[in-house]
Image (tube, helix red, strand yellow):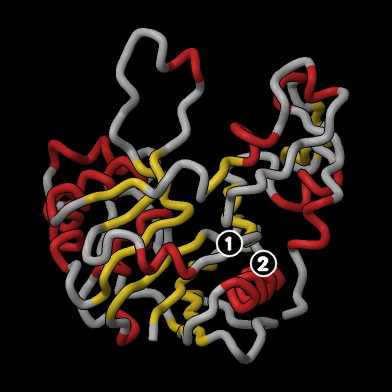
């Protein structure tokens, strides 16, 4: 038995994100699995999903709980009675291919996709050793060192600035500190906005491509899955409809519809 975990809090992601993620995993994972959603609101989530509450608030400075650092609490020994290989998927990921390989690859390592970085940021410097936590795997019950590293960093006043931004850099550092980190093969997890949307100005004329080798597509940032499906030219900002910069837009992407479904 393996585990698949997602996290849901706040109002942005409705229950249908959880339900469709579960359906995608069910269609593409051949072995028995336990599907766990860590959430403070289980309303509307399908019964096959096991909903568990968030861990106790670890007290991240300046942040209400739960927050983006809740992923670090997944590594805590005993959390939700998780044990063994555990794949964590963000709600804004689209499962479109086989998932068993994510459990067979480099057993015992921390595995994560290396973060996608724009080309212009890599011209004069090395690509940073930062993972994208949209899709990562760890061994629950044997990864408490990541959680302990997080607690030490959180309690260090000199590290307070690290908790004002995203959690991915801290999580990657914690995993490197606690064990061996392996990057997923690049073709397994694709970034929608970096690898599917054509470069400007072709994005105005060509539909985003469907990566044939990918098993998971990450919709980090914008467009999210519904925005990409409908076409991304405008977004809601504080109730107002604001035009998106031309190089960030995409045409409607109909192939998403058949992959992002409740049906198993």
Would you say the residues marked 2 and 1 are in contact, meaning their CB atoms lie under 8 Å apart? yes
Location of residue 7 in the rendering, given as x and y in whole percent from the top left corner: 49, 67
Q: Is residue 17 above or below residue 34?
A: above
Residue labelled with disc 1: 91
Residue farthest toward the bottom in the current orientation of the protein: 47
Residue farthest toward the top in the current orientation of the protein: 124
Q: Circle 2 sits in a helix, a strand or a loop, which is it?
A: helix
**150 sits left or right of 14 in the view:** left
**47 sits left or right of 77 in the view:** right
Q: Residue at x 28, y 79 (%)?
A: 84
User: Total number of numbered labels?
Assistant: 2
Numbered tag placed on residue 186 in the rendering: none
Location of residue 123 in the rendering, given as x and y in whole percent from the top left corner: 41, 10
Q: Is residue 148 above or below residue 112?
A: below
Query: Which is more toward the observer, 217 or 98?
Result: 98
Location of residue 183 in the rendering, given as x and y in whole percent from the top left corner: 34, 46
Q: CA distance from mark 2 to mark 1?
A: 6 Å
* Mark 1 residue crowding within 10 angstroms, few (<14) / some (14–19) / many (20+): many
**45 sits left or right of 260 in the view:** left
Location of residue 213 in the rendering, given as x and y in whole percent from the top left corner: 60, 48
Residue labelled with disc 2: 17
Q: Is residue 30 above or below residue 169?
A: below
Classify the position of the N terminus by image quarter: bottom left
Query: Which is more toward the observer, 30 or 120?
Result: 30
**166 sits left or right of 83 in the view:** right
């Amino acid at each position: 038995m393996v585990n698949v975990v997602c996290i849901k809090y706040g109002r942005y992601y409705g229950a249908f994100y959880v339900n469709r993620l579960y359906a995608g995993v069910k269609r593409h994972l051949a072995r028995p699995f336990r599907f766990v959603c860590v959430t403070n609101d289980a309303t509307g989530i399908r019964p096959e999903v096991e909903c568990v509450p968030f861990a106790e608030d670890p007290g991240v400075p300046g942040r209400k709980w739960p927050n983006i650092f809740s992923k670090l609490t997944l590594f805590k020994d005993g959390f939700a009675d998780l044990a063994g290989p555990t794949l964590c998927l963000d709600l804004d990921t689209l499962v479109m291919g086989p998932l068993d390989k994510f459990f067979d690859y480099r057993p015992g390592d921390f595995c994560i996709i290396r973060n996608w970085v724009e080309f212009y940021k890599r011209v004069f410097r090395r690509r940073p050793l930062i993972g994208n936590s949209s899709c990562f795997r760890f061994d629950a019950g044997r990864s408490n060192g990541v959680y302990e590293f997080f607690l030490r960093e959180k309690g260090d006043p000199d590290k307070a600035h690290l908790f004002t931004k995203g959690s991915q850099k801290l999580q990657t550092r914690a995993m490197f500190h606690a064990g061996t980190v392996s990057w997923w093969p690049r073709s397994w997890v694709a970034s929608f906005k970096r690898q599917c949307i054509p470069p400007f100005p072709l994005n105005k004329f060509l539909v985003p491509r469907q990566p044939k080798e990918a098993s998971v597509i990450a919709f980090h940032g914008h467009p999210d899955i519904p925005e990409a499906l409908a076409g991304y030219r405008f977004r809601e900002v504080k109730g107002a409809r604001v035009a998106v910069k031309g190089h960030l837009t995409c045409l409607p992407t109909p192939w998403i519809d058949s992959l992002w479904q409740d049906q198993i």
